[in-house]
Amino acid sequence: DSPQFWGACCAINSGNYVADILTRGSRFGFNENDTMAVGAARWKNLEFYFGDTWKVRPNVTLELGARYSILYETYDANDKITSFNAAAYNPSRPATDPCNGLIVPKGAGNICSNIPGASVPVEFENRALRKNNYGNIAPRIGVAWDVFNNGKTAIRGGFGQFFLRERTSPVFAALTQNPPFVKGVAGQRTLDAPAEFFLDPPTQTFGAPKFTFDPQAATPYSWQVNVLVDQ
């Protein structure tokens, strides 16, 4: 399970956390899920590099190149991730519908079919819930200048764009916590023995989608430049 506990919470408490901990009968808020979902992240990279070298002058060498990177978005091997999309949300549906506005991986089907009265989720165009970016072309430029044309002093410079895969773990882990993979129960409890529980609602629920991210294709990148003198 995955418990969360946030301390003194309720009207019958004094408002002083230290006093509430020491006072019998004080209530504290809590939330507990029935499982700690773990994603099975998978991804692939496909990259090509093209480049050539030219002698612009006897003492000047120019290098031009480009790297083409397809950094396929991360997906779950078991398709147990979901996201929320406001465009798929139906405001006329009851607030208790845990799958309203839910986006699921391509081919996952209606994963909410076992929840009475739940909406049918919308399948995304791929399993990653985010579009792949096929436009990552990174230019590279390099130059070397033999200043005195005697092979002893050279000035070198380079400039290029570098694409990189976004850190996957924080976002990917969050998407495993959306409905319908995790059920939770929340309420208030005492710390005294035997503990008393005051649940709201009194049974486990799937909650509502809490995590999402921009589904549009975008790849982080940086521009880098270097200049050095060799002797």
Image: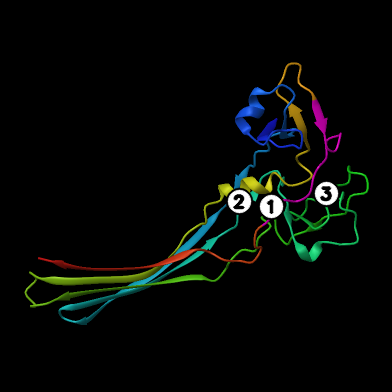
The quarter of the picture where the N terminus appears is: top right
In the image, which disc is placed on residue 211?
1
Q: At which x and y percent is residue 203?
A: 86, 34
Mark 3 element type: loop
Give amino acid for label 3: Pro
The residue stretch that appears in magenta: 197-212
The label nearer to you, 2 versus 1, is 1
Are the residues tagged 2 and 1 within 8 Å (C-beta)? yes
Mark number displayed over residue 219: none
Residue drawn at 46 percent across, 65 percent down = 221
Say whether residue 146 is left or right of residue 224: left
Alpha-carbon span between mark 2 and mark 3 = 20 Å
Q: Residues within 10 Å of mark 2 (few under 14, many from 20)?
A: few
Q: Quadrant of the C terminus?
A: bottom left
Foreground pick, 192 / 71:
192
Please state if 140 lies on the left or on the right of 127 as rendered. Answer: left
